[in-house]
Amino acid sequence: MARRWVALLVGLLLVGVLATPARAIGAFGPPVTIDNPTCEFDAFNVDQAQDASGATHGFSDLWGTGCNESFAIRYFQGSGTSWTVETTPYRGFVVAVAWDTTGTYLLYIDSALRLRISKRQANGTYIQGRLLSTTMGPDGSLAQGDVVATGGRWWATWREHIGPGGGPGDEFDQTELFQAYTIGGTFSPRERVTTNPAWDSAPSLALTPATTFPVRLVWARGGSDFEAADSDLRRALGDQDGNWVSASLATAGSQNFWPEVQVVGRTTYVAWNRDGRTVQANNASGTFLSHTFLTSAAQNHRPRIAVAAGQVVVGWTTQAPFRAFVAERTGTTWSGKVASPAGVTRLQLLTGVAARGGTADASILSLGSRLYAVTET
């Protein structure tokens, strides 16, 4: 079925918000290992999701020359100082992770460069899931997409390269967004949802709590994998038939990229990178207001956001040196702190955050060494 995109006739205001911290974020405790491979990896894909208790569920593939050359995907879960990890039957590259009470979902590129969705059920068993696309192109480890889930059903969106004639392209061709889903009814297979001469990339999804719809989608339009051309953010609302209503979200600056969206109650929260800084925006006031953090961000590394019980946590990787940084909002006040341990020499890349009982957890990759977690004390 063909889908349609319709522009919203609603203005979205993005302005900076500055506040003097009233309660500073706490110090982060010592690192606790999540996954410690027996080899030195130089490539990775990691994603995670938070459950209702604040615990983290995720998948990772850590690999390189002479290291996990079968691309085994590992599952991890935990919080604070308690973590478990296990090798899954899946092989390939992690794209995105979602959680609901029935289990943890994995959107991934398999070793034959096909897009699949699979699941670790709540009882610990693995199911093979579904094949979603066979036209992902040769850059499987660079795949971009997202997945959300509720009540045993899921919704996935991802990008694919499209050739000049509209067919499958290679890594040099522009990208468009595609989707497949079971939320709202029976399985709806792969379908294209954007048609634009600019690259559409880095999609992020969120469900409306309690009612599911509308589904929120935020993504980047513009730029490419090969040049730092101008890119803006767009947002859209989707219904159970896969129809979307879209609008511009962020056009200030030059490079708006790597959005991540969360919805709590009636409020949509978004974090992304803009020109070497991380930005957070939400529409709690009825229109989108934004805060740009002063601490630098590595533009090519996706920031993360977690929201729970009025607590908003944003994490990102700083630029030169590469360290994990976490900011936390209490009321309208933001404060932040480096989450990586002092004195480390390896690159430290933030891979996820969780908001738990008024404190923050951060998942961090020490490149070539291990995946670990730290907790705000």
Image (tube, rainbow, N blue to C red):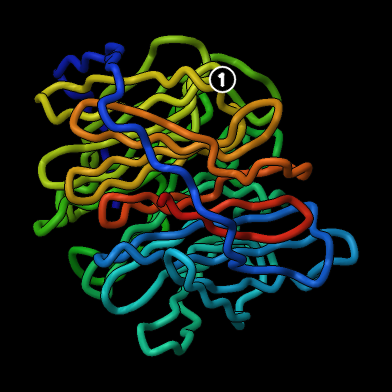
| Residue 176 visible within the image | no
The residue at the point 35 percent across, 41 percent down is 313
**Residue 262: % across, % down:** 29, 44
Residue drawn at point x = 42 percent, y = 50 percent: 376
Q: Is residue 323 above or below residue 96?
A: above
Give the residue type that dot 1 points to: Gly
Residue at screen point 69% across, 51% down: 366
Q: Is residue 72 left or right of residue 168?
A: right
In the rendered image, which quarter is residue 13 located in?
A: top left
Q: Which SS class for mark 1?
A: loop
Circle 1 Cα neighbour tier, 10 Å, few/some/many (<14 / 14–19 / ≥20): some
Please give left or right for residue 13 compared with residue 300 in the image. left
Q: Quadrant of residue 346?
A: top right
Q: Nearer the viewer, residue 51 or 336?
A: 336
Considering every residue shown, the one lying at the far right of the view is: 66
Instruction: Tell me which residue sits at (14%, 18%) in the image.
Output: 9
Q: Residue 42's spot in the image, x, y percent?
A: 80, 52
Residue 371, quarter of the rendered image: bottom right
The answer to whether residue 49 is seen in the rendering is yes
Q: Position of residue 375 (x, y in %)?
A: 45, 54
Frontmost residue, 156 versus 172: 156
Front residue of 232 and 169: 232
Number of numbered tags placed on the structure image = 1
Q: Is residue 36 above or below residue 371?
A: below
Q: Is residue 119 above or below residue 255?
A: below
Q: Is residue 1 left or right of residue 338?
A: left
The residue wearing badge 1 is: 276
